[in-house]
Image (spheres, rainbow, N blue to C red):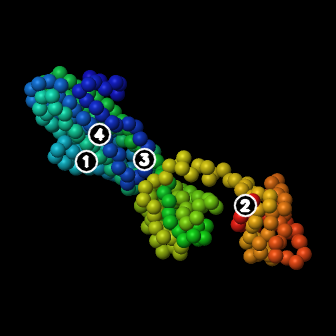
Amino acid sequence: MTENGNLPDWINVKADDVEIGCDRTVDVSLEIHNVQKGKRKFEISITSNFSERDEMIEWSLTLNTGRIEEFSLSPQTGEPLEAEVEIEGGRSKDVSISIKTPKGGYKGDSVVFTLEIRSEDGIHSFRKSFKITLVPVIIALKTMVGKEIQVARDLSLKSERDYEERGGSSRGIINEVLSIMSPREVKGYIFVEAMHPDRVGYLAKGIRGYKGEVKGDISIKEIEHYLTPKPAVSGIELGALVELVDGPFKGERAKVMSIDAAKEEVTVQLVESMVPIPVTVKAEAIRMLEKI
């Protein structure tokens, strides 16, 4: 029997350890090739070993051997799932397995699945184990442009009230919103880390400026560059044309005369003033109009 090593020529399995969020699907593909001339039967067995905080939480599994079967899985399931396929000599059979993670799982909950395939004549056998572990995910929420911070703040307050109303840490309950990020460079979206992403959309309903949830999870690699703030003066060039967006000269256009990166300040000269007036402002108080 082969375990997780190089695959023999009669079988091809794509099943790896994975960390994934709640209410998500893990697909496993299996191809069995009958290398002999005569028709043969192959037995498929799937066992599951749970490590869960709440043993009543159920996962689901769909097995497609040409006939679709659906199963609910939990630590109480006990017996392995079994199926049988018959394959003509020299032909192959595709089998698919879809595992749906629970909506209400906890961080670190995991299941080790062991897949065994045996030919009925005892000539061929194969065994492979893979682990699925539940982790928080990052999702993107759509907002009205300019309302990103407001939506983030209101969602945080609403999730905190929800957490307290459900009993808080005294009952082992977690806050449905683990963290929120609203990068200044991203307009119309905020990023939310959550264990139960379906609850985030529920909590966000009714928040002013919220426009819906973006389908799919966000990889941390896609947004990690936002975690290191850029200097406020980044992208500002000497001689560039800018608009003042804050302060007593708000709305005035000006030309950048000097940049103080250490203080994150910019000295500009108002272009429509009768007398050239140098004004020093914070870099956040200007908006680039035209680079030189």
Q: Nearer the viewer, residue 168 or 162?
A: 162
Residue at position x 55%, y 62% in the image: 190
Q: Real-space Cα distance between discs 4 and 2?
A: 53 Å
Query: Is 34 drawn above or below residue 197 in the view shown?
Result: above
Foreground label between 4 and 2: 2
Q: Which residue is mark 1?
A: 62
Secondary structure under tag 2 reads loop
Residue at position x 26%, y 37% in the image: 30
Foreground label between 2 and 3: 2
Residue type for callout 3: Ile
Secondary structure under tag 3 reads strand
Secondary structure under tag 4 reads strand
Q: Which residue is mark 2?
A: 291
Query: Is 256 drawn above or below residue 224 in the view shown?
Result: below
Residue type for callout 1: Thr
> Is residue 96 among the parts visible in the rendering?
yes
- Of the numbered discs 4 and 2, the one sitting upstream in the chain is 4
> Is residue 79 among the parts visible in the rendering?
no
- Of the numbered discs 4 and 3, the one sitting upstream in the chain is 3
Q: Real-space Cα distance between discs 4 and 1?
A: 12 Å
Residue type for callout 4: Ser
Q: Real-space Cα distance between discs 2 and 3?
A: 44 Å
